[in-house]
Image (spheres, rainbow, N blue to C red):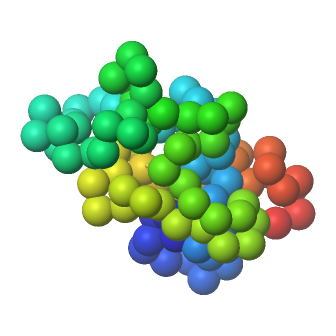
Amino acid sequence: MTHAVFVNPDFDCQSCGACCAYSAEWPRFSLETEEELDSIPADYVAADLGGMRCENDRCAALEGTLGRAVACKVYAVRPIVCRTCMPGDDECLMARARLFGTDR
Ligand code: SF4
Ligand code: SF4
Protein backbone atom coordinates (compact mmCIF):
# COMPACT_ATOMS: atom_id res chain seq x y z
CA MET A 1 0.00 0.00 0.00
CA THR A 2 0.73 3.20 0.19
CA HIS A 3 -0.20 3.08 3.79
CA ALA A 4 1.08 -0.29 4.40
CA VAL A 5 -0.67 -1.70 7.33
CA PHE A 6 -3.45 -4.03 6.32
CA VAL A 7 -5.86 -3.76 9.20
CA ASN A 8 -8.73 -4.89 7.03
CA PRO A 9 -8.28 -7.55 4.36
CA ASP A 10 -11.15 -6.03 2.38
CA PHE A 11 -9.01 -2.98 1.72
CA ASP A 12 -5.81 -3.76 -0.08
CA CYS A 13 -3.91 -0.50 -0.29
CA GLN A 14 -1.34 -1.87 -2.69
CA SER A 15 -4.05 -2.39 -5.26
CA CYS A 16 -5.86 0.86 -4.49
CA GLY A 17 -4.16 4.24 -4.01
CA ALA A 18 -7.41 6.20 -3.95
CA CYS A 19 -6.53 8.36 -0.93
CA CYS A 20 -3.23 9.34 -2.57
CA ALA A 21 -5.13 10.64 -5.59
CA TYR A 22 -8.10 12.19 -3.85
CA SER A 23 -7.13 15.85 -3.68
CA ALA A 24 -4.08 18.08 -3.91
CA GLU A 25 -5.20 19.44 -0.55
CA TRP A 26 -5.04 16.07 1.10
CA PRO A 27 -1.35 15.24 1.55
CA ARG A 28 -0.57 18.45 3.43
CA PHE A 29 1.95 18.72 6.18
CA SER A 30 0.80 19.25 9.75
CA LEU A 31 2.86 18.49 12.83
CA GLU A 32 5.96 17.08 11.15
CA THR A 33 9.29 18.22 12.54
CA GLU A 34 11.75 20.10 10.35
CA GLU A 35 13.87 16.98 10.34
CA GLU A 36 10.99 14.86 9.10
CA LEU A 37 10.15 17.33 6.38
CA ASP A 38 13.78 17.53 5.31
CA SER A 39 13.82 13.79 4.82
CA ILE A 40 11.14 13.94 2.12
CA PRO A 41 12.83 14.28 -1.27
CA ALA A 42 12.31 17.83 -2.53
CA ASP A 43 11.08 16.60 -5.89
CA TYR A 44 7.92 15.39 -4.21
CA VAL A 45 7.26 18.46 -2.11
CA ALA A 46 4.90 21.21 -3.27
CA ALA A 47 6.32 24.57 -4.32
CA ASP A 48 4.71 26.22 -1.29
CA LEU A 49 6.41 23.63 0.96
CA GLY A 50 3.06 23.00 2.61
CA GLY A 51 2.56 19.45 1.52
CA MET A 52 3.28 16.86 -1.09
CA ARG A 53 3.46 17.98 -4.70
CA CYS A 54 0.45 16.82 -6.64
CA GLU A 55 -0.28 16.51 -10.32
CA ASN A 56 -3.94 17.31 -10.55
CA ASP A 57 -5.24 15.43 -7.52
CA ARG A 58 -2.60 12.77 -7.46
CA CYS A 59 0.39 12.85 -5.14
CA ALA A 60 3.64 12.90 -7.11
CA ALA A 61 5.09 10.23 -4.85
CA LEU A 62 2.48 7.67 -5.83
CA GLU A 63 3.72 5.24 -8.44
CA GLY A 64 1.76 2.63 -10.31
CA THR A 65 -1.78 2.37 -11.58
CA LEU A 66 -4.71 3.33 -9.41
CA GLY A 67 -6.98 0.43 -8.62
CA ARG A 68 -4.36 -2.06 -9.76
CA ALA A 69 -0.92 -1.79 -8.24
CA VAL A 70 0.49 1.24 -6.45
CA ALA A 71 3.25 2.17 -4.05
CA CYS A 72 4.45 5.24 -2.21
CA LYS A 73 7.93 6.30 -3.24
CA VAL A 74 8.48 8.04 0.08
CA TYR A 75 6.74 5.49 2.24
CA ALA A 76 9.30 5.48 5.06
CA VAL A 77 9.15 9.26 5.38
CA ARG A 78 5.56 9.95 4.32
CA PRO A 79 3.61 12.75 6.03
CA ILE A 80 1.50 12.28 9.13
CA VAL A 81 -1.78 12.48 7.24
CA CYS A 82 -0.68 9.48 5.21
CA ARG A 83 0.23 7.55 8.35
CA THR A 84 -3.06 8.17 10.10
CA CYS A 85 -5.38 7.32 7.22
CA MET A 86 -6.31 3.69 7.74
CA PRO A 87 -7.87 1.24 5.34
CA GLY A 88 -11.60 1.23 5.93
CA ASP A 89 -11.81 4.52 7.81
CA ASP A 90 -14.02 7.42 6.72
CA GLU A 91 -11.37 9.13 4.61
CA CYS A 92 -10.51 5.86 2.94
CA LEU A 93 -14.13 5.13 2.09
CA MET A 94 -14.64 8.64 0.78
CA ALA A 95 -11.60 8.40 -1.46
CA ARG A 96 -12.52 4.98 -2.76
CA ALA A 97 -16.10 6.02 -3.42
CA ARG A 98 -14.96 8.99 -5.46
CA LEU A 99 -12.46 7.06 -7.51
CA PHE A 100 -14.14 3.72 -7.94
CA GLY A 101 -17.79 4.31 -7.10
CA THR A 102 -19.54 3.12 -4.00
CA ASP A 103 -19.46 -0.58 -4.77
CA ARG A 104 -15.91 -1.22 -3.63
S1 SF4 B 1 -8.16 4.62 -0.02
FE1 SF4 B 1 -8.10 3.15 1.66
S2 SF4 B 1 -7.64 1.16 0.73
FE2 SF4 B 1 -7.13 2.79 -0.74
S3 SF4 B 1 -4.93 3.16 -0.42
FE3 SF4 B 1 -6.08 4.63 0.83
S4 SF4 B 1 -6.28 3.66 2.86
FE4 SF4 B 1 -5.71 2.07 1.38
S1 SF4 C 1 3.19 10.60 0.33
FE1 SF4 C 1 2.81 8.48 -0.21
S2 SF4 C 1 1.15 7.82 1.15
FE2 SF4 C 1 1.17 10.07 1.15
S3 SF4 C 1 -0.30 10.72 -0.44
FE3 SF4 C 1 1.74 10.60 -1.37
S4 SF4 C 1 1.88 8.54 -2.27
FE4 SF4 C 1 0.20 8.54 -0.76
The residue depicted at 37 percent of the width and 56 percent of the height is: 74
Asked if residue 45 is positioned above or below residue 39 in the image, the reply reads above
Measured as percent of width and height from the top left, residue 45 is found at: 39, 34
Asked if residue 47 is positioned above or below residue 15 in the image, the reply reads above
- The C terminus: image quadrant: bottom right
Of all residues shown, which one is farthest toward the top? 48
Is residue 73 among the parts visible in the rendering? yes
| Quarter of image, res 38 | top left
Horizontally, residue 84 falls left or right of residue 25, namely left
Of all residues shown, which one is farthest toward the left? 35
Viewer-closest of 4 and 47? 47
Of all residues shown, which one is farthest toward the front? 43
Is residue 91 among the parts visible in the rendering? no
Asked if residue 85 is positioned above or below residue 67 in the image, the reply reads above
The residue depicted at 43 percent of the width and 60 percent of the height is: 73
The residue depicted at 61 percent of the width and 50 percent of the height is: 19
Horizontally, residue 78 falls left or right of residue 39, namely right
What count of labels does the image hold?
A: 0
The residue depicted at 55 percent of the width and 55 percent of the height is: 62
Measured as percent of width and height from the top left, residue 83 is found at: 37, 54
Viewer-closest of 10 and 55? 55
Measured as percent of width and height from the top left, residue 54 is found at: 56, 34
Asked if residue 45 is positioned above or below residue 94 in the image, the reply reads above
Horizontally, residue 97 falls left or right of residue 74, namely right
| Quarter of image, res 4 | bottom left
Measured as percent of width and height from the top left, residue 29 is found at: 34, 31
